Structure formats: C-alpha cells, structure tokens
Image (cartoon, coloured by chain):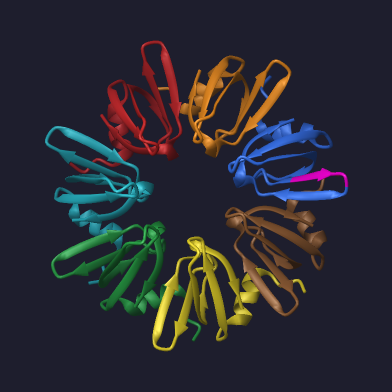
Chain colours: A cyan, B green, C yellow, D brown, E red, F blue, G orange
Amino acid sequence: MTDRPLDVLEETLGSEVSVTLKGGEVYDGVLAGYDQHMNLVLEEGDNVTIIRGDNLVSIQP
Amino acid sequence: MTDRPLDVLEETLGSEVSVTLKGGEVYDGVLAGYDQHMNLVLEEGDNVTIIRGDNLVSIQP
Amino acid sequence: MTDRPLDVLEETLGSEVSVTLKGGEVYDGVLAGYDQHMNLVLEEGDNVTIIRGDNLVSIQP
Amino acid sequence: MTDRPLDVLEETLGSEVSVTLKGGEVYDGVLAGYDQHMNLVLEEGDNVTIIRGDNLVSIQP
Amino acid sequence: MTDRPLDVLEETLGSEVSVTLKGGEVYDGVLAGYDQHMNLVLEEGDNVTIIRGDNLVSIQP
Amino acid sequence: MTDRPLDVLEETLGSEVSVTLKGGEVYDGVLAGYDQHMNLVLEEGDNVTIIRGDNLVSIQP
Amino acid sequence: MTDRPLDVLEETLGSEVSVTLKGGEVYDGVLAGYDQHMNLVLEEGDNVTIIRGDNLVSIQP
C-alpha cells in the first residue's frame, strides 16, 4: 500500500507495461530495465527501446 | 495548519486523490506511494499507475 | 523591506493567498504549508490542494 | 562596470523595478526581496507579489 | 532482462541505432559514443553527429 | 582559439553585445556583468537590464 | 569508435561545425570553445557567437 514509485518499477521488471509519453504516444512492452531518472528499457519481441525518463507521463504495469 | 506538501502526501497514503496534470488530464485513485520528486503511485481497483512528478499541477486529497 | 521570498511565504502561513499558475489558472485559499521548491498546500473550507512549485508564476498574499 | 546580476539586484532593493515574464506580462513594483534563484518579492502600495524566478525574462531597475 | 538503460547503450556501441527526438526527427547511425546525460555520438559513413540528450524521446538499438 | 564560453564573456565585459532570446527578442547593450548561469547585466545609456540566462539562445560580442 | 560526446567536441576545436538549435536555426562556424554544458563558442570570420547549450539539438563536425 505504500510502495514508492521506483519500488513499483522494480517489482514490474519482466512484466508488460504500457507507457504514455508527453507527446501522447503509447509504448507497450516488457519492462527490461530502468534507472533512477525513470529512463526505461522496453522489450517487445526482438525489439528493444530505450525511453528517456523526462518524456514520461505515466507507466501502467 | 503548517503541513509541508510532502507531509500532506504522507498523511494521504491509502486515501483517494484527484491529480491534475499539465496536459489537463485528471487521474483519480488511491494514493499508494510517492517519492520526494512527487512521483506518485495511484491504484484504482486492480489498476496501478505511476505518474511522473514533473507532469503534476495539483493533487487534491 | 528586504524579505526573501521564502520568508514572505513563512509569514503568510494561515492567511489567504492568490496563486497564479503558468497555465493562467488562479487558486485562492489559505496557505497551509510550503517547501523550499515553492510547492504549496492551500486550504479552502474542507478542500486541500497541493500545488507543484514549478507551475507557479506568482503568489499574492 | 562588472557587477554580477545578483549584486545588481542587491543594490536595487527598495527601488522600483519593471519585471518581464516569459508569458509577456510586465510587473512593476518596489523590489522588496529576492533569492539566489531570482525569485522576487515586489511591493506596490499594500500589495505584495512573490514571482517565481524561472518565469523571468528580464528585470529593469 | 534487467539491463539498466546506460548498460544497454554500452552494449550497443558500434551497432546501428535509430534515435527519435522530441521534434519528431529520426536519426539513424552507428552509436559511436554516449555519456551519462544520454548525449550521443552517431556515425553514418563519414558523417558524425553529436545529439544532445535532452532532445531524445527513444533509442532503438 | 580554445576559449571557453565564460572566458569569452569575461573578455567581453565593457563591450557591446547583441543578445538573442528564445522568444526571438534581441537586446543590445554593453555587457556590465554575468554569472556562471549566463545571467547577464546589460547597460544601454542609463538603462540597466538583467537578463535571466535560461532565456538566452546566443550572445554576439 | 567509443568517443564520448565531449571528447568529440575536444577533437573538433578549430574545425568547422554545423549546429542545429531547437528552434530549427542552423549556425555554421569554427568551433573555438565549449564547456561541459555544451555551451559553444563559434567563430565565422570576425564574428564570434556564444550559443547556450540547452538550445542545441545536434552538432555536426
């Protein structure tokens, strides 16, 4: 009930997430990594995408 | 009367909040977590949403 | 005559303020708290609003 | 001739300034305070306005 | 599975990447360097481009 | 040939500069001061203008 | 092959560069200096231009 945001990301590693960016784009993929700036690594099949954290609006595990 | 903003968030854990973002979107949910950047974790039923703090305009407990 | 901005906020605790945001919105309420980023806590009747400091243009006690 | 910006603000305390913001608004008043982020306190008659430094374009003493 | 974003960049050195910027532009090239701000050096034939990290939306190795 | 930007500002103290801001405005004046954020003090006759560094695009001595 | 962005700038000192800004403007000149914020000093004939790093999109040596 009192998970901090980065704790939730840690628990989400290896699971599907839906990421909404400031420009309105949505990225879906498996969360393969993150760092303290909320930069993310998403995997979808063979495709890997690094997303810069300052573009994020929300992340839905 | 002199609560600091993060103290108010701390007291609000587990309660409903309404969050307004810079883009005008409003998110409602139970505040399940936060950090010192005002990154938030909201829960609404089974859905969890991490919101990046730099998108926030206001939070209403 | 030489009050620093956070000193003025400190003196304003418990009094009415009018807050103008970058988007043009105006929030009125009693200043119930603040921090060094100028994040604010406003109270108006039973309603509490946390406003993130980086949205502020001006605060009028 | 080689005054640093905050030194000029210091010398301007108690005098009239004209402040232009990024949105184009102009605030006139007596400079009653400032801090190292260029947050300002302006006084005009009985009115006090705190202006957040990151909105400033220019200050004219 | 739990690579951090900068680890993925490190592994990608010398390989083709596709970089999307906030303005919508896409840069393709071989990733020849990066730093902790995600500033990038891309090479495409004889052309070298330094891209400032704060413009990035995503990087696809 | 290898002057750093703040070194060039230092050498320019007391000389005319033309400053272009993000909003497209151009300010001309004698550079009377600066700091490490590129906040500037310009003088033109009796007029003094403090310009906040984060509005700058370019400075031409 | 693994040059960091500031290393590439260092090697480029004294050579022509083409600099693209967020507003779409392009500046050409000899790179005469830079700092860790990617603030740049460009020379073109007798003209010197200081460009603030946070406006940069890309630099092409």
The residue located at (58%, 42%) in the rendering is F22
Residue D33 is drawn in which quadrant?
A: bottom right
Residue D10 showing in the rendered view: yes
The residue located at (28%, 22%) in the rendering is E16
Relative height, residue D41 to residue E52 (above, below):
below
Tell me residue A60's x, y (percent): 21, 56
Residue E37 showing in the rendered view: no
Relative height, residue A2 to residue D7 (above, below):
below
Bounds of the magenta segment = F41-45
Of residues G6 and C34, the one nearer the viewer is: C34
Tell me residue B39's x, y (percent): 35, 61
Residue B50 is drawn in which quadrant?
A: bottom left
Tell me residue C34's x, y (percent): 52, 74
Of residues E37 and B25, the one nearer the viewer is: B25
Q: From the viewer's perspective, is F37 left or right of A34?
A: right
Q: From the viewer's perspective, is F55 left or right of A5?
A: right
The residue located at (70%, 24%) in the rendering is G48
Quadrant (top left/top right/bottom left/bottom right) for the C terminus of chain B? bottom left
The residue located at (39%, 64%) in the rendering is B38
How many numbered discs?
A: 0
Relative height, residue B25 to residue G60 (above, below):
below
Tell me residue G49's x, y (percent): 66, 28
Q: Main secondary structure of the magenta part?
A: strand
Residue B23 is drawn in which quadrant?
A: bottom left
Magenta-drawn stretch contains G10: no
Q: From the viewer's perspective, is G36 left or right of A34?
A: right
Of residues G60 and D55, the one nearer the viewer is: D55
